[in-house]
Image (cartoon, grey):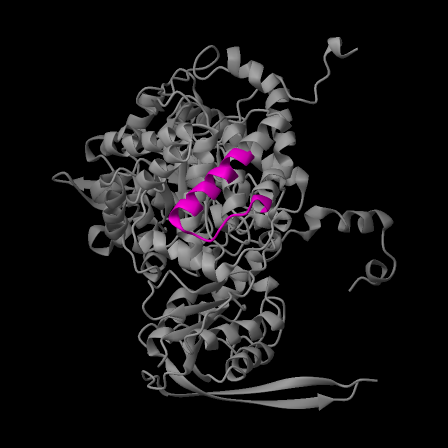
């Protein structure tokens, strides 16, 4: 039998996040409850797996991932824009606990974006990898083919009310006047015999 | 745990479990978080105190404790000269007036303008859904009902989009809305919708739902004629989350109107719950605050009916009744209502039809906002309550019920022809502007396509560069009209030019305006709803009824 593996994610909040100076970096802003009070997306994928895919997608293009945690807002657009503004390349990624994701650029309006992935139930791990990859390509100044958007028009009837419940839980962790902080991260892989 | 239930299952229950409705999400009420449709224990009781012409207490709250919505509504919406008397009336009496055919729409409006948000909610809670539909039939502003559609596709393919807009145009949609998969495609989508819609008929209003500043720029370039995705919210915290206030939204509204673009706000039940800012209030109470804020801002209309949050009211008891109630509330304040039905909320065909009838039977300014004129798999608003595969059902329901749902049957040859014309026009425009070539193969594919899966792929990177040129070089609707005239598409060119003239004239900024095929603006000014019971108001008959009757499937005695 083939063994399965588990990604163990360790996230430690650090100092207030600063503006980066490395032109090759992509900043990922995670939401207040990500990997803490909540640890699975709306379709019950571990946060560790999701974040690792984005980070790996950035790294394999030769860009530098940096993670910050947003406290003052759990709003995706503003998280993504904040990440972009703090990023040395001007490119940021916003990621909510339920799995919703955005790629942002510092000079865009907050409610605009480079690429938006609003339908969290239809985002696969492969898509998270591709999101990381594209974030890196924007940062490196290359021409980018946007990640194809998946459109599941029946996600709303099934998931919207649950998404609202998750967001209510996330919002309980918002701290109005707290600035985003740097996050120290590491992933370890634990193999399990099946 | 009941062992019998887990181990041996009822065969009938297993059949029920497989039914589409059981894929829908339902939740129990949670009033403390505002997860409740029409009435929460935390909703305020109606009250008003007016001193020296100023509201000093509203719905149990003193002026010093007002949040920004309370203040806006107290200062700009409520008519203090009417409020004293109106607030003394029993809510059930006001509810009866709403349903009473002997009380005219205008009389009703003069009552409503003296009501506080909590009073409106108390009145709406007196009505069952049939009474709400009777009231909606009387209270909508424009006499003639109409419909709006979505025209989008997952690849933002501009040729397909123009062809789909043209088909939607001959089906009878008076407004067409698009949005993007990728934001930078926005100028192409605006162009495709303009060209496609005007190929079908003159007067169709179009919009490109985007981040607000870009949307305004496209309207100023003359590539779109209206906007409706200017969102407002029922609590201060959610409003602030979007970096906005009632004043900033009012400013934005005037920016559109002053540049000749029709505009309405958007709000809806459930949005505050979704954004975790409901403050324990019912969805309807918060939505009534939005309706009243829109009125105070002076906009001509509002899109509501939960809209993109429909999964939330739809998950709780009396939720779809709340959605009808919010549509009704909008019309009570003499605002145009674009009444939702524009998002998937159920897997059940029975349930989605039942919901839709609440707006279709009484008629609204736009029954859907909008109906997906493309397959839902291509609907970039995440799918509508009905899509292009439901068109025949909808046309048959119009005919069965003798109800004007705003659409008309079309012949297949007519559709093929108009789609071809629209695609050819786009080919000509792209060629003239030096945009990436549109091949004859693409024109052919768009002419016969059902969805974006039927289209050859385009070079996205090159298309995006061209789309950005529209904004950087400020390519206008007027230039598009000139190109079409030069290339032999005289009729479409003139229609686009007419739309630009409408922007200067501004008549279509009046409440509930549409522009008919004769290029005449029909609004609550010249087509005011005068319903006062049987024999009055909008009556389906004459040519329009002939149009609806003549579905292509009906067999004639002469066929044999």
Locate residue B308, reporting x and y percent: 49, 50
Q: How many marks?
A: 0
Q: Nearer the viewer, residue B258 or A135?
A: A135
Q: Is residue A70 above or below residue B145?
A: below
- In the picture, which quadrant includes the N terminus of chain A? bottom right
Can residue B87 be seen by looking at this rendering? Answer: no
In which quarter of the view is residue B302 placed?
Answer: top left
The magenta stretch spans which residues?
B419-441
Q: In this picture, is B542 found above or below A18?
A: above
In the rendered structure, does residue B426 fall within the stretch colored magenta? yes
- The quarter of the picture where residue B517 lies is top left
Determine whether, in the image, residue B12 is placed left or right of residue B298. right
Determine whether A12 is above or below B550 in the image. below
Residue B131 seen by the camera: yes
Q: Residue at x 36, y 83 (%)?
A: A23
Which residue shows up at 58% across the image and 49% down it? Answer: B378
Residue B314 in the magenta stretch? The answer is: no
Camera-side residue: B61 or B235? Answer: B235
Residue A29 picture location, percent across and down: 43, 76
Q: Position of residue B284 (x, y in %)?
A: 43, 45
């Amino acid at each position: 039998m083939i063994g399965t593996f588990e990604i163990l994610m360790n996230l430690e909040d650090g100092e207030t996040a600063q503006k980066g100076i490395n032109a090759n970096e992509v900043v990922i802003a995670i939401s207040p409850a990500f990997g803490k009070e909540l640890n699975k997306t709306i379709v019950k994928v571990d946060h560790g797996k999701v974040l690792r895919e984005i980070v790996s997608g950035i790294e394999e293009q030769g860009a530098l991932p940096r993670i910050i945690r947003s406290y003052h807002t759990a709003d995706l657009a503003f998280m993504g824009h904040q990440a972009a503004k703090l990023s040395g390349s001007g490119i940021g990624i916003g990621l909510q606990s339920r799995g919703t994701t955005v790629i942002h650029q510092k000079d865009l309006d907050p409610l605009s974006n480079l690429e938006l992935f609003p339908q969290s139930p239809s985002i696969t791990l492969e898509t998270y990898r591709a999101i990381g990859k594209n974030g890196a390509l924007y940062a490196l100044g290359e021409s980018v083919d946007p990640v194809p958007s998946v459109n599941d028009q029946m996600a709303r009837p099934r998931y919207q009310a649950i998404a609202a419940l998750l967001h209510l839980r996330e919002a309980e962790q918002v701290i109005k006047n707290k600035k985003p902080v740097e996050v120290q991260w590491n992933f370890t892989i634990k193999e399990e015999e099946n | 745990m009941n062992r019998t239930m887990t181990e041996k299952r009822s065969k009938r229950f297993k059949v029920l479990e497989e039914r589409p409705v059981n894929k829908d999400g339902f939740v129990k009420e949670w009033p403390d978080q505002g997860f409740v449709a029409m009435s929460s224990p935390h909703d305020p009781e109606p009250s008003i105190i007016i001193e020296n012409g100023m509201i000093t207490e509203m719905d149990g709250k003193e002026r010093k404790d007002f949040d920004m919505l309370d203040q806006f509504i107290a200062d700009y919406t409520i008519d203090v000269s009417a409020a004293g008397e109106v607030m003394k009336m029993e809510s059930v009496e006001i509810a009866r007036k709403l349903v009473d055919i002997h009380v005219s729409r205008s009389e009703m409006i003069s009552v409503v303008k003296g009501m506080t948000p909590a009073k409106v909610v108390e009145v709406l809670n007196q009505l069952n859904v049939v009474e709400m539909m009777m009231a909606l039939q009387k209270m909508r502003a424009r006499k003639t009902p109409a419909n709006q559609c979505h025209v989008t596709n997952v690849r933002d393919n501009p040729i397909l989009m123009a062809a789909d807009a043209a088909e939607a145009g001959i089906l009878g949609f008076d407004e067409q809305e698009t949005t993007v998969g990728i934001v930078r495609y926005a100028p192409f989508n605006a162009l495709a919708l303009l060209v496609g819609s005007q190929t079908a008929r003159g007067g169709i209003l179009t919009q490109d739902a985007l981040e607000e500043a870009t949307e305004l720029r496209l309207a100023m370039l003359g590539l779109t004629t209206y906007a409706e995705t200017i969102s407002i919210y029922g609590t201060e915290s959610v409003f602030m989350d979007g970096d906005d206030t009632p004043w900033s939204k009012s400013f934005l509204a005037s920016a559109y109107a002053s540049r000749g673009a029709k505009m309405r706000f958007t709000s809806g039940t459930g949005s505050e719950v979704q954004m975790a800012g409901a403050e324990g209030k019912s969805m309807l109470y918060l939505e009534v605050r939005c309706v009243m804020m829109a009125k105070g801002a002076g906009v001509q209309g509002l899109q509501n009916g939960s809209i993109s949050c429909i999964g939330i009211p739809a998950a709780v008891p009396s939720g779809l009744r709340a959605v009808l109630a919010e549509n009704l509330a909008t019309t009570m304040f003499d605002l145009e209502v674009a009444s939702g039905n524009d998002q998937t909320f159920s897997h059940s065909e029975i349930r989605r039809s039942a919901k839709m009838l609440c707006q279709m039977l009484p008629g609204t300014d736009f029954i859907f906002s909008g109906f997906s004129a493309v397959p839902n798999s291509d609907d970039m608003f995440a799918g509508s309550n009905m899509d292009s595969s439901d068109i025949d059902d909808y046309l048959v329901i119009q005919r069965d019920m003798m109800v004007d749902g705003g659409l008309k049957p079309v012949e297949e040859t007519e559709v093929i022809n108009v789609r071809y014309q629209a695609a050819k026009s786009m080919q000509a425009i792209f060629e003239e502007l030096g945009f990436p070539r549109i091949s004859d193969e693409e024109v052919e594919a768009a002419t016969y396509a059902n969805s974006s899966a039927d289209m050859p792929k385009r070079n996205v990177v090159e298309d995006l560069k061209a789309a950005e040129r529209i904004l950087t070089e400020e390519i206008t609707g007027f230039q598009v009209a000139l190109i079409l005239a030069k290339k032999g598409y005289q009729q479409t060119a003139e229609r686009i030019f007419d739309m630009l003239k409408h922007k200067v004239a501004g008549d279509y900024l009046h409440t509930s305006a549409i522009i008919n095929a004769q290029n005449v603006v029909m609004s609550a000014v010249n087509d005011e709803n005068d319903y006062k019971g049987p024999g009055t108001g909008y009556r389906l008959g004459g040519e329009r009824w002939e149009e609806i009757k003549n579905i292509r499937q009906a067999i004639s005695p002469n066929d044999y």
